[in-house]
């Protein structure tokens, strides 16, 4: 269950891959054309097109460009939540976190929402995992 800590949207430099359809949805949400959105909010990484990052308040890590730490005091929220990319929607059910009990526990040290709230059965977890990572 999400605690709105922002930890999944912040950390060392990384990437949030976005598909053509996700770019179109995000651009429409922000009332921009695709080219304008790509120029302002994305860059190309080895894996594909990624959302940009910005310096996090701690000065050492990076936040997703759409992570908002001001709208809800004491919380970190996604400003494009309804149209967030599949990579974001499928967290924490990524192959890297599901490969072993240890990897799940390691992710839980970063994400206080892991093992909290609604429980997912194996079929639901596989659907979430496969939604992006196949």
Image (tube, helix red, strand yellow):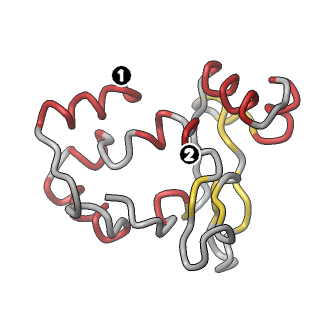
Q: Nearer the viewer, residue 42 or 47?
A: 42
Q: Quadrant of the C terminus?
A: top left
**Image quarter of residue 22:** top right
**Image quarter of residue 27:** top right
Identify the residue at horizontal 38%, vertical 29% (top origin).
Answer: 133
- Please report contact status of discs 1 and 2: CB closer than 8 Å, yes or no: no
Instruction: For mark 2, give the secondary structure.
Output: helix
Identify the residue at horizontal 54%, vertical 72% (top origin).
Answer: 75
Dot 1: few (<14), some (14–19), or many (≥20) neighbours within 10 Å? few
Identify the residue at horizontal 64%, vertical 54% (top origin).
Answer: 64
Identify the residue at horizontal 47%, vertical 38% (top origin).
Answer: 87
Q: Nearer the viewer, residue 17 or 100?
A: 17
Residue 34 as seen in the image, left or right of residue 26: right
Q: Quadrant of the N terminus?
A: bottom left
Q: Which mark is residue 15?
A: none
Cα separation between marks 1 and 2 = 22 Å
**Image quarter of residue 11:** bottom right
Residue 61 as seen in the image, left or right of residue 111: right
Residue 57 as seen in the image, left or right of residue 86: right
Residue 52: horizontal and vertical position, in percent?
72, 47
Dot 2: few (<14), some (14–19), or many (≥20) neighbours within 10 Å? few
| Label 1 or label 2, whichever comes before in sequence order | 2
Q: Relative to residue 30, is residue 53 depicted above or below?
A: below
Residue tagged 1: 134
Residue 28: horizontal and vertical position, in percent?
74, 27
Residue tagged 2: 81
Instruction: For mark 1, give the secondary structure.
Output: loop
Residue 43: horizontal and vertical position, in percent?
75, 37
């Amino acid at each position: 269950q999400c605690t709105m800590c922002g930890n999944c949207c912040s950390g060392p430099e990384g990437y949030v891959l976005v598909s053509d359809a996700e770019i179109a949805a995000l651009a429409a949400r922000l009332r921009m054309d695709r080219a304008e959105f790509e120029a302002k909010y994305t860059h190309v990484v080895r894996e594909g097109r990624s959302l940009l990052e910005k310096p996090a308040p701690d000065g050492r890590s990076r936040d997703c460009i759409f992570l908002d730490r001001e709208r809800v005091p004491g919380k970190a929220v996604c400003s494009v939540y309804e149209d967030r990319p599949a990579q974001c929607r499928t967290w924490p059910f990524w192959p890297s976190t599901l490969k072993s009990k240890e990897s799940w526990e390691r992710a839980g040290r970063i994400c206080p929402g892991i093992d909290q709230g609604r429980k997912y059965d194996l079929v639901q977890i596989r659907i979430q995992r496969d939604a992006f990572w196949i």
